Image (cartoon, grey):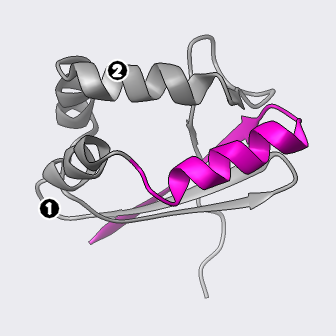
Amino acid sequence: MKRYCYTLDLKDDPASIAEYEKIHKSIWPEIHKSITDAGITVMDIYRTGNRMFMIMEVDDSFSFETKAAMDAANPIVQKWEAFMWTFQQPIPTAKPGEKWVLMDKIFTL
């Protein structure tokens, strides 16, 4: 099992952050299905202030390319991503057009 960690910022607005968290307590069923269909077995999102940290654990069937193609072909995922982007903003080191930024692992105990 592989694990990937990502970071992203939310717009720094307490009401918007509260709404974002509320939405994530009950994500759309199609989004849940798209995540698990891609081979993602665990997805946890943590937040401090407006910075978020996501941990994904994936099975051997997972590939970034396949997930990207699946998402691009799924209008519900596209609608969800556009909606989520109204709450989100890139971190300062994100490349143009990049949302969730893959983090480098620097320590293991």
Residue drawn at x 65%, y 55% is 53
Q: Secondary structure at mark 2?
A: helix
Which disc is residue 60 wearing? 1
**Residue 57 on image: x %, y %:** 35, 66
Q: Which residue is mark 2?
A: 78
Which disc is residue 68 wearing? none
Please tell me which residue lies in front, 19 or 53: 19
Query: Which of the 4 image quarters holds residue 54?
Result: bottom right
Whether residue 109 is visible: yes
Whether residue 104 is visible: no
Please tell me which residue lies in front, 1 or 72: 72
Q: Which residues are magenta?
A: 1-27
Instruction: State the residue lying farthest toward the top.
Output: 96
- Marks 1 and 2, how far apart at CA: 25 Å
Instruction: Give the left or right position of residue 73, taking residue 94 as reference.
Output: left
Of the two numbered discs 1 and 2 in the rendering, the one whose residue sits closer to the viewer: 2
Residue drawn at x 56%, y 13% is 97
Tell whether position 14 is magenta: yes
**Do the numbered discs 1 and 2 sit on residues whose CB atoms are within 8 Å?**
no
Q: Which amino acid type corresponds to the residue marked 1 in the rendered image?
A: Asp
Q: Which amino acid type corresponds to the residue marked 2 in the rendered image?
A: Gln
Tell whether position 59 is magenta: no
**Residue 105 on image: x %, y %:** 59, 61
Residue drawn at x 75%, y 28% is 93
Q: Quadrant of the N terminus?
A: bottom left
Query: Which of the 4 image quarters holds residue 69?
Result: top left
Instruction: Give the left or right position of residue 9, taking residue 97 as reference.
Output: right
Q: Secondary structure at mark 1?
A: loop
**Residue 81 on image: x %, y %:** 45, 26
